[in-house]
Amino acid sequence: MNDYNLTEILEYIDPSTCSYQEWINVGMALKHEGYTVSDWDMWSMKDVNRYHSGECAKKWTTFQGSSAPVTAGTIIQMAKENGYHYENVSAELDWDSEIGFKDELVIVDKNWIERSEIHIPEKWNPTEQIITYLETLFEPDENVGYVTESWEHDGKFLPSKGCYDRTAGQLIKELYQCKGDIGSVLDDYNSEVGAWIRFNPLDGMGVKNENVTEFRYALVESDTMDISAQKAIITELELPVAALVHSGKKSLHAIVKIDASTYEEYKKRVDYLYNVCNKNGLKLDIQNRNPSRLSRMPGIMRNGKKQYLLDTNIGKENWNEWREWIESVNDDLPDPESMADVWDNLPSLAPPLIDGVLRQGHKMLIAGPSKAGKSYALIELCCAIAEGKKWLEWNCTQGRVMYVNLELDRASCLHRFKDVYTALGITPNNLSNIDIWNLRGRSVPMDKLAPKLIRRASKKNYIAIIIDPIYKVITGDENSADQMAHFCNQFDKVCTELGCAVIYCHHHSKGAQGGKRSMDRASGSGVFARDPDALIDLVELELNDDILKQEKNKAVCKVCEGWLYKYDKLYHASQDDLCSETQMLALCREYLENDAYECVIEDVGKARKTVESRSAWRIEGTLREFPKFAPVNLWFKYPVHDIDNIGVLKDIAVDDGMPTWKKNFAKKKTDAERKTERKNSLETAFEACGIDDKVTVKSMAEYMGVSEKTVRRRLKEHGGFWIDEGQVGKK
């Protein structure tokens, strides 16, 4: 296992997701492989909720070896479960070969560190050293904390609380006037121990973190490696160092510009700084993270050695400049290529997955409001890809597909697939092309899910992975562009690693959608809509009474047609009859037996209710690889979508943003209009339900889809009918 750098591999393992035993196993493996307790401690600190200082060191001493030791293989296996890919390096290597994986943020080649010479000043001016340090780090009116007194504990000298009531300006003035007697300004110090200074300004009330007024600097110190190597790495990393001080012993103290506006930002930036340093071979003392931490004061003697200022303001100018440089210098981005080199030999485009909409290996988002049937649309797509059929109106390439179910329980999800297959009328010849990964209650953020997904799908040859829905795995604020860019990058990783398309759905933002472009309707940052290669957007169409009446008429006619055909009576119906529910019901009443006709009436009631439950939708697309398609109108007839090939929906405008109360007011009918409608529907029901000139309240209620009480009330209102023991007749 010596070919591995386990501290780098640990970057793939989040300690906050580990059980207690897994955490122990990591520590035992590190010790067995010759690593230090600080390596274990540094990794454990990432679990901010469970980490306790000193706990790693305490447990480390209990690891005494075993006949069956925990080895590096344990760490490697845990890392592989989170996306780490093992590269076998036992084969013969050439000059261009790469070993292992390339880690982000690594600048320094630890095998080729050029040591930087450290020149100890023979002639030095302690007063000048301290003044330069103060002028570099502080404003004149800022309070400075320093310590010259120490006390002994278990043979080790420790600093006292020290002084914090004077400003940098006061100290500088007195130092200029002290004629080299710094003890008269700072008090005498123990020359065997040295003196300390706090590198961030204080409020003059204390020396704790809450007393820090500006989170300006952080301390970088390592005492586990040669001091010249420390200097070399600090230099090569171009750390934005305000002051670099020799501790007088075995370490350098680099006061690094952090420039954080809050304590929370300070902690994040220090974590990032320490991570970069550790990855580049500068193993830091983790106890130095606090902004109120003491550092070694220059211009001081320590056991015969000088604590002196090596340099000021080296490396990058500030934190932002340094961080941008760090993240760009090793970005693994490809080099630019000349168009002239590829003009006559262009690479082949990825083949279509959905004709005219999406290519293989690309990303697609389906956006829409709740109840649009987005999940059903995705399941329909799974079926279409698996069987090589049409999805809505587009042909699909046949292949294997994975459906990542984050919302439904397992049974509901499986039943839904069967229901969709049945409703579409597709013969399930290729069910083996569909894999379902049920993760309800087990979902993790997308940046954690992506490597797990890649590992499970790496050898399955999927041409599409469908994730439903993405709100379950969103990391960060969905209205933050940078956070959502990071989130969407996880889909790119899946596409790149697996060579398959990634398709997912998201909900609309609140409010009316009619005045918006399709790409502006998805909730959250605009990144959602602009990141995918194809955006399919669903907007609901508001159905008017005329369309509903028309659809009910068609549904009733279809029911009647089916019953007439069943009893070989359909030849009685003309082409005009087939389009009129009144005529078709009359034909059923005339040519079918009473029992059959009662079944017709029952089915008609169901058909009417089915129509009432329908919703209408318009699909618009924003495509990167294909021309824009004309809007597609469709019905959502639970559990599937059905294209409106007749054109019933084409003239309906989407929601224009008018408040609901205004729309309802505009649609409101007069009392006279409502009375006329009730009268007409009652007369139609009476005519439809007549069997041998005998009509009942019950049969009329079933036909109209209302209660018997309502029928009696409307008959009374009408005035042209009589009721006798449930039988109805005309006066």
Image (cartoon, grey):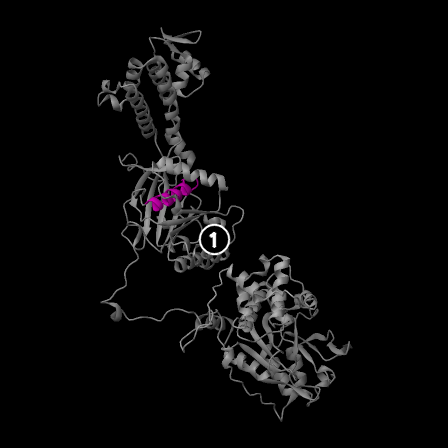
616 is higher (above) or lower (below) than 367? above
- Location of residue 195 (image quadrant): bottom right
112 is higher (above) or lower (below) than 391? below
Could you tell me if residue 516 is visible in this image?
no
358 is higher (above) or lower (below) than 240? above
Is the magenta region chiefly helix, strand or loop?
Answer: helix
Query: Over which residues does the magenta segment extend?
Result: 369-387
Magenta span contains residue 372: yes
Left or right: where does residue 631 sit relative to residue 200? left
Image quadrant where one finds the C terminus: top left
Left or right: where does residue 461 sit relative to residue 116? left
Residue 373 pos. (x, y %): 41, 40
Between 430 and 611, the residue placed more toward the observer is 430
572 is higher (above) or lower (below) than 89? above
* Residue count near mark 1 (Cα–Cα under 10 Å), binned few <14, some 14–19, many ≥20: some
Residue situated furthest bottom in the rendering: 123
Q: Residue at x 56, y 72 (%)?
A: 278
Q: Residue at x 72, y 80 (%)?
A: 148
Could you tell me if residue 613 is visible in this image?
yes
Residue 354 pos. (x, y %): 31, 49
Image quadrant where one finds the N terminus: bottom right
Q: State the SS at label 1.
A: loop
Residue 371 pos. (x, y %): 43, 39
Between 194 and 342, the residue placed more toward the observer is 342
Q: How many marks?
A: 1
- Location of residue 302 (image quadrant): bottom right
**Kind of residue sitting beneath label 1:** Glu
> Circle 1 sits on which residue?
478
Q: Residue at x 43, y 69 (%)?
A: 331
